[in-house]
């Protein structure tokens, strides 16, 4: 009987639990031990050859792999990766080898005699299981009774699909062949070279890829339709959409812009699109969206937009995420990080570039301005925690591999730091750094040292050393700036310290900050930039004149907080550019939470922001207002909070109304989506909430009766106070929909119902297992976020964890435990929340670190409630 790789270790655990003797895996040669994490040096694959026979409707598939390798020394064991696979036969150098599974997805191949150095081949025949629960490895989903197979391998799940050297440093060409049943289509990274009958099916052989790590190998199999979508890039590579049968018409918007995105990325990077084709495989859910070269995967919720559902929001969402995944074809695919500690080279640089591409496609969206402000705010909040990871964090475990994809740090902080250096060096110089990086390491891997060397060559070693500090030190500096004017001239005197939400000092943490300040006196306003600090907490930045005012974050792109003087804020405000006001609002919120700035002074900026005609400032006003922590206010203060919302944003919300107007500016539509639901829902504006309920009922009766721009936010608002009849209609609509986007959104709305019986019904859908957890998890997240439903959701989580946990991927579990940990802001329940979550997080890669940060954030939340509660009450009582 075939021996499952790793199944022996799983079986051993099960047997031990049952009291039975555990089966033993075949022994390794004396003195040989499995690697702790990374594969040992000395065996290098040259090429990967993968042949699979796969029917998406079947539970299992079979395959063979062949790797020409080079051995540097004699090897008694050749190590690679395989997880959840049955190894049927293995050979090394043409001779039979024993397959020895080990923990961590490792597989040792033991030939009869040590394999001598030099060239050899590794060959393995195996069988695998098609996943239908977690969407990882090779997974499948049904549409209209037809089965489709997809792949998702990042970061370390290629080993679940086929035995491989599953680390990013092994970047090799691949040859793939798939044998599929007649009527199914197979699509992979490269064009098909030939198709031929094979038994009762068809064998499809694909062209050899450019060098790729295993996590970027991809294919799909099923009765797909293909939509031709033009050609893009200087080489005019073909762009196609691979969609479930009958859904091609829903790609209208996506197909109209995707080729154009390739043109725009080429123009921005100065490097041609690297691959032979650009297929878009439309995968079932948002999860699975992935930058595979030649066959980028984009989820149905993004890509399939029926004409009746096409809105500004959905167009922007598709364009921005498609831009992100396609930019990865340069940053990540063409040049790949050598190991997961340099994930920032993939994700930070892509997150920096992708909004620029979206803006070039549609300037009215102002994607770059919003992404820079939101990303900076997200990163600063995370970097204020002691448990935060570094941007370049050493990775020595599977927990840490998963943690390398930290949204707030790897994506948001990395992009914010890149924006700071772009401001400091200038756009042209920074673009040249990125272009040089791509050209120097094309088809190879790169590490931080490589990027820093490129930066030093294009600027100075001091600038590169400055960036190293932001990569290797956790946290963020708080900058205190004053003006010195004397016989030596004028200068900004800068003192820095690490900003920690707890207020704890960290005197050893200093940065060489690429600081740009704006200074003014009368009509004269100038910007000055210099590297400041690094050798200690103090430094100076020369100024061209003695200013009357100084703002030490020109353009709002500096990755630091600025200490604020409450008395000086009203006078400084008129001098600030819009982006600088957004930065100030973010800083004010964090400073006030810690007690560095009076809450009334921070909340005093809400009014000027809310009154702005700039929608980004209005959005910032709502974010700053949450400094009041409305979700934790007592009944009386919460009533005052609702009144504050109605008074501050209500006039604009009522003027805009729910319904879009023909030909209105993009900013107007965005403002409506922002303020109308907030006033109707959180502000409990009776008129707007009543209109939302009426619109929801109309839409449920006739999808064409209400524009999607109004229907979705109205449904979300109506659900919170809805009755059983509305609950039943939303549930029925969800179950009747074949559109996964519609289904998932409607199900999530059920988690917002506050009436106890309805909240319990909604949570019962999660607990019962009748619905796919990938669809119903939105119910749980919505209920955990609800002021009136969170403890019901917590009770479900506690009572049903053992049933839910096996259906969660590690990333899903990390998100869930982090959200649930937010409940520890309640001082009466904090110990209970932490005690329950800590041991359960250990079972999921990356979850313990996510939980540690979330619990620290909850502690800061408790401290802020205790410190600022009276001041918030005074502000709301005005």
Image: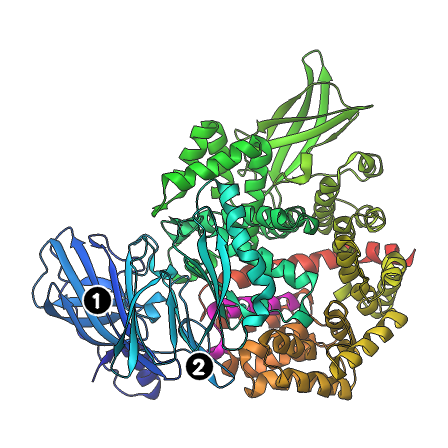
Q: Using the image, determine if residue 35 lies above or below residue 684.
A: above
- The answer to whether any part of residue 239 appears in the image is yes
- Residue 168 coordinates in the image, percent (x, y): 35, 55
- Residue at (44%, 42%) from the top-left corner? 271
Q: Residue furthest left?
A: 113
Horizontal placement of 670 versus 818: left or right? Answer: right
Residue 147, numbered label: 2
Question: Does label 1 or label 2 sit earlier along the sequence?
Answer: 1
Secondary structure category for the residue under label 2 = strand
- Tell me the quadrant of the picture where the N terminus can be found: bottom left
Q: Is residue 816 magenta?
A: yes
Chain part drawn in magenta = 805-823
Secondary structure category for the residue under label 1 = strand
- Tell me the quadrant of the picture where the C terminus can be found: bottom right
Q: Residue furthest right?
A: 878
Residue on which disc 1 sits = 108
Q: Quadrant of residue 318?
A: bottom right
Q: Residue furthest top?
A: 487
Q: Main secondary structure of the magenta part?
A: helix
Q: Using the image, determine if residue 2 lies above or below residue 280.
A: below
Say which of 766 and 291 sits in front: 291
Q: Is residue 653 magenta?
A: no
Horizontal placement of 184 versus 552: left or right? Answer: left
Badge 2: residue crowd in 10 Å (few <14, some 14–19, many ≥20): some
Residue 177, numbered label: none
- Residue 818 coordinates in the image, percent (x, y): 58, 65
- Residue 516 coordinates in the image, percent (x, y): 64, 31
- Residue 622 coordinates in the image, percent (x, y): 77, 56
């Amino acid at each position: 009987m075939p021996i499952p790789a790793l199944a022996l270790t799983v079986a051993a655990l099960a047997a031990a639990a049952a009291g039975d003797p555990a089966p033993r895996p075949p022994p390794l040669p004396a003195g040989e031990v499995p690697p702790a994490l990374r594969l040992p040096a000395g065996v290098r694959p040259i090429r990967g050859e993968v042949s699979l026979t796969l029917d998406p409707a079947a539970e299992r598939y079979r395959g063979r792999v062949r790797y020409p390798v080079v051995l540097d020394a004699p090897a008694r064991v050749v190590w690679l990766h395989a997880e959840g696979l049955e190894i049927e036969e293995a050979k090394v150098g043409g001779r039979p080898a024993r397959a020895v599974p080990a923990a961590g997805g490792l597989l040792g191949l033991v030939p009869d005699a040590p394999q001598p150095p030099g060239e050899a081949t590794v060959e393995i025949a195996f069988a695998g299981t098609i996943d239908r629960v977690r969407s990882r490895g090779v997974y499948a989903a049904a549409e209209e009774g037809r089965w489709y197979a997809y792949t998702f391998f990042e970061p370390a799940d290629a080993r679940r699909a086929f035995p491989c050297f599953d680390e990013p440093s092994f970047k090799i060409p691949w040859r793939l062949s798939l044998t599929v049943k007649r009527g199914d289509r197979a699509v992979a990274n490269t064009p098909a070279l030939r198709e031929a009958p094979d038994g009762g099916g068809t064998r499809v052989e694909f062209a050899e890829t450019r060098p790729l790590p295993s996590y970027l190998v991809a294919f799909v199999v099923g009765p797909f339709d293909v939509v031709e979508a033009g050609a893009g890039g200087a080489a005019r590579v073909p762009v196609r959409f691979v969609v479930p049968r009958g859904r091609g018409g829903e790609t209208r918007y996506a197909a109209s812009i995707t080729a154009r995105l390739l043109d725009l990325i080429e123009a921005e990077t100065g490097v041609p699109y690297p691959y032979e084709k650009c297929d878009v495989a439309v995968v079932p859910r948002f999860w699975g969206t992935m930058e595979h070269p030649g066959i980028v995967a984009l989820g149905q919720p993004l890509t399939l937009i029926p004409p009746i559902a096409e809105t500004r929001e959905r167009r922007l969402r598709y364009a921005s995420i498609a831009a992100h995944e396609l930019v990865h074809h340069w940053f990540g695919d063409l040049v790949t990080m050598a190991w997961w500690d340099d994930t920032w080279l993939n994700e930070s640089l892509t997150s920096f570039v992708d909004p620029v591409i979206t803006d070039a496609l549609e300037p009215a969206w102002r994607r770059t301005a919003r992404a820079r402000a939101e990303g900076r705010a997200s990163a600063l909040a995370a970097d204020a925690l002691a448990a935060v990871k570094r941007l370049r964090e050493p990775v020595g475990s599977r927990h840490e591999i998963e943690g390398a994809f930290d949204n707030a740090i790897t994506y948001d902080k990395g992009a914010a730091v890149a924006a700071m250096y772009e401001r400091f060096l200038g756009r042209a110089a920074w673009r040249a750094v990125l272009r040089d990086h791509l050209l120097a390491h094309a088809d190879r891997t790169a590490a931080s040292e490589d990027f820093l060397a490129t930066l030093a060559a294009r600027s100075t070693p001091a600038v590169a050393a400055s960036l190293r500090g932001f990569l290797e030190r956790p946290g963020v500096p708080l900058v205190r700036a004053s003006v010195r004017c004397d016989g030596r001239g004028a200068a900004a005197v800068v003192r820095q310290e690490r900003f920690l939400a707890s207020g704890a000092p960290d005197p050893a943490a200093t940065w060489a900050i690429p600081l740009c300040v704006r200074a003014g006196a009368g009509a004269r306003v100038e910007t000055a930039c210099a590297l400041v600090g690094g050798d200690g907490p103090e430094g100076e930045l020369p100024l061209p004149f003695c200013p009357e005012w100084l703002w030490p974050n020109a353009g709002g792109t500096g990755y630091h907080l600025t200490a604020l003087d409450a008395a000086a804020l009203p006078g400084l405000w008129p001098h600030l550019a819009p982006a600088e006001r957004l930065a100030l609002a973010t800083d004010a919120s964090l400073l006030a939470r810690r007690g560095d700035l009076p809450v009334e002074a921070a909340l005093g900026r809400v009014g000027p922001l809310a009154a702005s005609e700039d929608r980004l400032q209005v959005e910032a006003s709502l974010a700053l207002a949450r400094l009041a922590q409305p979700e934790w206010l007592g009944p009386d203060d919460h009533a005052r909070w609702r009144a504050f919302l109605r008074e501050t944003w209500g006039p604009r919300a009522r003027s805009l109304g729910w319904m879009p107007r023909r030909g209105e500016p993009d900013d107007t539509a965005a403002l409506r989506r922002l303020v109308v639901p907030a006033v109707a829902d959180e502000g409990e504006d009776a008129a707007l909430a009543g209109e939302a309920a009426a619109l929801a009922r109309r839409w449920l009766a006739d999808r064409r009766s209400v524009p999607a721009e109004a229907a979705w936010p109205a449904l979300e608002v109506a659900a919170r106070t809805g009755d059983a009849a509305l609950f039943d209609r939303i549930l029925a609509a969800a179950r009747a929909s074949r559109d996964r986007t519609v289904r998932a959104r409607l199900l999530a709305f059920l988690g917002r119902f506050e009436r106890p019986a309805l909240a319990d019904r909604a949570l019962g859908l999660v607990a019962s297992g009748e619905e796919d957890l990938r669809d119903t998890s939105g119910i749980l997240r919505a209920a955990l976020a609800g002021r009136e439903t969170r403890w019901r959701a917590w009770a479900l989580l506690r009572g049903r964890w053992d049933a839910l946990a096996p259906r969660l991927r590690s990333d899903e579990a990390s998100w869930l435990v982090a959200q649930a940990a937010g409940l520890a802001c309640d001082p009466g329940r904090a110990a209970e929340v932490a005690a329950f979550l800590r041991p359960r997080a250990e079972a999921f890669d990356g979850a313990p670190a996510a939980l540690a940060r979330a619990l620290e954030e909850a502690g800061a939340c408790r401290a802020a409630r205790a410190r600022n509660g009276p001041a918030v009450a005074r502000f709301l009582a005005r």
